[in-house]
Image: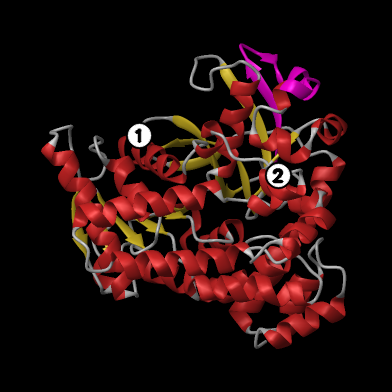
Amino acid sequence: MTRLTIVGGGGFRVPLVHSALLGDDTVGELVLHDTDPRRLRVTAAVVAAQDAAWRAARQGPAPAVRVEPDLDGALRGADFVFSAVRVGGTAGRVSDERLPLAEGLLGQETVGAGGVLYGLRTLPFAVDLAERVRERAPGAWVINFTNPAGMVTEAMSRVLGPRVIGICDSPVGLVRRAARAAGADPDAPGFGYDYVGLNHLGWLRRLTVDGTDLLPGLLADPAALGTFEEGRLFGPEWLAALGSLPNEYLHYYYFGREALAAVRAAEEPRGAFLHRRQADFYTAADGLDGPAALDLWRRARREREETYMAENRAATGGWRRDPHDLDGGGYDRVALALMRAVARDERTTLILNVPGGGAVGLLDPDAVVEVPCEVGGFGARPLPVAAPDAHQAGLMLSVKAVERAAIEAAATGSRPAALRALAGHPLVDSAAAASRLLDAAGW
């Protein structure tokens, strides 16, 4: 029986992973571990309610669910370990956003100064988890969703090699939304794409049906671009000039001034909003029966999804997410597709974060990149991609240097490395401000 352990099992989005497993027999047992007893208790109640409703309807297989407060106990016997941890909790995210804003810099969870601060705090835990997996569950595959995902996956890969694979729902969501806008079925035979980058820093460069590239036509069609999220975020003029479709997080790079102004104009930063709303949810749900907790979670989740990247939308005129935007790729479905392919050796192609192995020639083979991969019982193997253009290469090299400096700083406690990571980021314009940020963060 295949066992999946979720580290961060009290997390708000864990019920999505459980829901994806319902009706699929890839995972026979789901183990939830978290260091916060209340969060774990509430999430377990939501998951139990989902499970009960599913079994009552006799809709198909469902994994047995077990709560395990001890990390080592949760890891032993695991075939897959899903890492979805927020070190420092949502309060840490609030700090990561507010400290840069005080310096006139963008505060964001995974991008810029905020992302580097988050990485510096998270990397020691991630490496420790990798070492524990190597000792307690040496045959397990680690699926990393802990942010900053590219940086964290690379640090863990130095311990686990190819047995750690990073996932993100942004690239698959982009591909699917762009395909629909171009009039293509992303699930049809003959559909293909070309995507290259790092986590939260990638570009969709081809969108093909039976070998015909639909992307140039899409980029030249303002009406079609206006039907999906990335088209509205970046606008037809910039997309036509760029010649590709960027990952949504590149909005912080291409429209940094506008994004920063929108964050400052908001009633509260995104992290503060989530910190408050998730605290409200866990407080209100604690002690409720399963169905009531599930209903409350569904309403809280909808609010969270509808307000995702709200500041960026405000910076581009303000607009609401439509149903297709809310139903992009789903990291839960990416995780299930990955586990199915590995557990059953069912070959598929997924955009994943893995050591490039030479697939992206401008980076060394150990550098974790975000590219299409062939997935099977062997794990994830990067597929050949066209070389990044000069613009893409420049950003990738800069951000990879930031990631590696942060990994060095977290491993050694080196302030010079931490300063290189912060000051070297393309969205940080002052080494003096970076130094003050390190002081404020306790470095």
In the picture as drawn, the residue positioned furthest to the front comes out as 267
Q: Position of residue 84 (x, y in %)?
A: 44, 60
What label does residue 345 carry, if any? 1
The magenta span reads 202-223
Q: Nearer the viewer, residue 177 or 147?
A: 177
- Residue 140, quarter of the rendered image: bottom left
Residue at 66% x, 27% y is 227
Q: What amino acid type should be assigned to the residue bearing mark 2?
A: Gly
- Three-letter amino acid code at the position of disc 1: Asp
Using the rendered image of the protein, determine whether residue 283 is visible from the camera's viewpoint.
yes
Residue occupying the point 45% across, 74% down = 128
Residue 212 sits inside the magenta stretch: yes
Q: Nearer the viewer, residue 75 or 67?
A: 67
Location of mark 2 (residue): 318
Whether 222 is among the magenta residues is yes
Question: For the point 17% across and 33% down, which residue is it?
Answer: 60
Placement of 185 over or under 52, stated as above or below = above
